[in-house]
Image (cartoon, grey):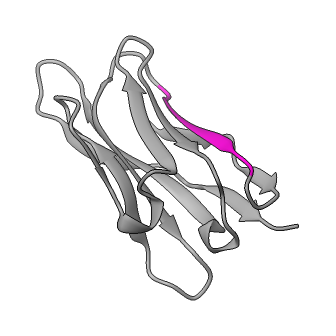
């Protein structure tokens, strides 16, 4: 079964940067819309950023100007560049994407998450 696999999480100091990646496990599937969510301890999962199939982006107010979402359709990859990280950005980050296996309709998938810890 196709999977989304996140990578790039880890421990970073406040003010630092990380780049999260989201890979599609099977090349037969093509990536379309991509979103990143996060869930901090004892909090609900929240949308961080999204990019539509056409390339339109949307960001949570808390990350505007610091995070940038992108995708590479040719490589079947999604990315989240995170700059000026703050301790409150600490969370498990999840990739969510619409994947299409031609000629079917896109279906939505979740990755298992990658932990980002911002601490000195």
Q: Residue 53, located in which quarter of the rendered image?
A: top left
Left or right of residue 60: residue 106: left
Residue 4 visible, this angle:
yes
Q: Which residues are magenta?
A: 16-25
Reply yes or no: does residue 40 show up in magenta.
Answer: no
User: Above or below — where is 46 with respect to 48?
Assistant: below
**Furthest-top residue in view?**
74
Left or right of residue 33: residue 69: right
119 vs 9, nearest the viewer? 119
Left or right of residue 96: residue 11: right
Residue drawn where x is 16% and y is 29% of the image: 54
Quadrant containing the C terminus in the rendered view:
bottom right
Quadrant containing the N terminus in the rendered view:
top left
78 vs 63, nearest the viewer? 63
Reply yes or no: does residue 22 show up in magenta.
Answer: yes
Residue drawn where x is 73% and y is 56% of the image: 15
Q: Position of residue 22 (x, y in %)?
A: 51, 36
Residue drawn where x is 46% and y is 60% of the image: 63
Left or right of residue 20: residue 65: left
């Amino acid at each position: 079964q196709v999977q989304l696999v996140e990578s790039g999480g880890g421990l970073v100091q406040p003010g630092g940067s990380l780049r999260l990646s989201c890979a599609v496990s099977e090349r037969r599937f093509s990536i379309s819309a991509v979103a990143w969510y996060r869930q901090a301890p004892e909090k609900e999962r929240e949308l961080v950023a999204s990019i539509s199939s056409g390339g339109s982006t949307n960001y949570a107010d808390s990350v505007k100007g610091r995070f940038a979402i992108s995708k590479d359709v040719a490589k079947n990859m999604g990315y989240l560049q995170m700059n000026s990280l703050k301790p409150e950005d600490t969370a498990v980050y999840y990739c969510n994407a619409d994947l299409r296996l031609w000629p079917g309709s896109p279906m939505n998938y979740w990755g298992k998450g990658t932990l980002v810890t911002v601490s000195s």
